[in-house]
Image (cartoon, helix red, strand yellow):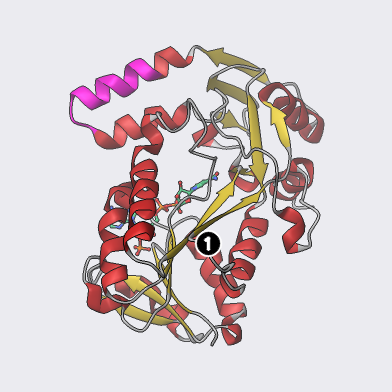
Amino acid sequence: MAPSVLLIGASGALGRPLVEEFQKQRARFNRVAILADPARAHKFSEVQKNGIEVISGSFLDFKVYQGFDTVLSLVGNALMRLQPAIIEAAVAGGVRHFYPSEFGTDIALDGVWQFRYFRDKVVTRDHLVATAKRVPDFRYTLMLTGAFSDWAVGEFSGIDVEKHTVKVYGYPEAEVSVTALKECHRAVHRRVLLPFPAGQASREIRIRGDHLTWAQLVALLEEIQGVKYQVTYIDPKEAAKKQEEARLRGDEEGEILWAGKTLGPSGKVAVPLPLDNDKFQFKAETLKETLLQVLKGN
Ligand SMILES: NC(=O)c1ccc[n+]([C@@H]2O[C@H](COP(=O)([O-])OP(=O)(O)OC[C@H]3O[C@@H](n4cnc5c(N)ncnc54)[C@H](OP(=O)(O)O)[C@@H]3O)[C@@H](O)[C@H]2O)c1
C-alpha cells in the first residue's frame, strides 16, 4: 500500500517547496496531509485544492495521527523542543515511520552534538533511539544535508550580495558542506516511497553537493559577480559571548540566533562521506550552478 504521510511545519522555509513537490507527486501516495495548529490552519486553504488534506489540531493529540503511517516533521527552531512529545503522540496514534526535522549537518559529529544550536535535535534523536527499542515496528529516517546552497549566501550567513561584504564569526579555512534545496526535496520524496530495509530501525540519508572552505565560497562569489568582496572574520568567541548574554536574560530566540551565526563559518556544517547521492540517480548540482541561478537567474 502506498504511504499515508502527515507533514508538520509545512508552511516554513523548507516546508513550502516540499509541499509543492508533494502536490506534483500526489498520485504516488495514499494520503498526504498537513497537520496545522487551529490558529494557523487558514494558511493552507490553497493547497487543499490540490488534493492535500489539512488536519487542524494539536500536534500533541494522538487522534490527529490516526490513519497515517509516516510523519515528516519540518518544524523550525521555535517548535524543535516539542518533537519528543510529537513522537509520543504520533506513535500512540499508530504512526510507525518518523522523519525528524534534521535537514542539516551531521549532528552526531564531535564538537557539533554538544553545540547549543542543535540541543533539541540531539534530544529528539535520543528519543527516537529509545522509541525504536520500546516499539518493535517503529522506524525513523535521518535526512542529512549541507547548508542549503540556495540560502548559503544571505543575512543568516553574514553575506551581503548587494554590498559585497562578508562579516562572519569564523575562519577562512573553515569547511562547509552544501546541498541544493531541490535535491533534498527529491531525496525526501523518493525515500518516503521506498520500503524500509528489513531488520533495521533507523537509516540515514546523506545528500551533499560541494564541500569547500569559506575562502573558496567567497572567491566563487567574487568570480560570479565580478567584484571584490570586503571580508571580515570575527572570532566566534564574540558570538558565544552574545549567546551567553541572551541565555542569561532568558532570551531563547537570541541565544539560538547567536549560536547559529557561527555554524557555517566555524566549520560545524559537514556531511561526511559516504554519501547517498547515487541512490537517487542525480549528479549533485555544484554551488556555482546554484549561485548562478540565485544571483543571475541562469
Ligand atoms: N540545511 C540548511 O541550510 C537549513 C536551512 C534552514 C532550515 N533548515 C532545517 O530545516 C528544518 C525546518 O526549518 P525552517 O527554517 O523551514 O523552519 P521555520 O520556517 O522556522 O518553521 C517551520 C514551521 O514551524 C512552525 N512554527 C514556526 N514558528 C512557530 C511558532 N512560533 N508557533 C507555532 N508554530 C511555529 C510553523 O508551522 P506551520 O507551517 O504549521 O504554521 C512553520 O511553518 C529545521 O530542521 C532546520 O534546521 C536547514
Say which residue label 1 marks: 200
Q: Position of residue 214 (x, y in %)?
A: 66, 25
Whether residue 297 can be seen here: yes
- Residue at left 62%, top 54%? 181
Q: Quadrant of residue 84?
A: bottom left
| Disc 1 element | loop
Q: Is residue 51 left or right of residue 123?
A: right
Whether residue 40 can be seen here: no
Q: Position of residue 38 (x, y in %)?
A: 23, 72
Q: Is residue 250 magenta?
A: yes
Point out the residue furthest to the left here: 249
Check the image and report above or below for 235 versus 65: above
Q: Quadrant of residue 6?
A: bottom left
Which secondary structure class fits the magenta region best?
helix
Check the image and report above or below for 293 versus 254: below
Instruction: Please state, as top left, top right, bottom left or bottom right, where the N terminus lies in the image.
Output: bottom right
**Which range of residues does the magenta coloring cover?**
240-251
Q: Is residue 22 magenta?
A: no
- Residue at left 65%, top 64%? 186
Q: Position of residue 128 (x, y in %)?
A: 38, 54
Q: Is residue 254 left or right of residue 179?
A: left
Mark 1 belongs to which amino acid?
Answer: Gln
Q: Is residue 88 left or right of residue 1?
A: left
- Residue at left 43%, top 83%? 48
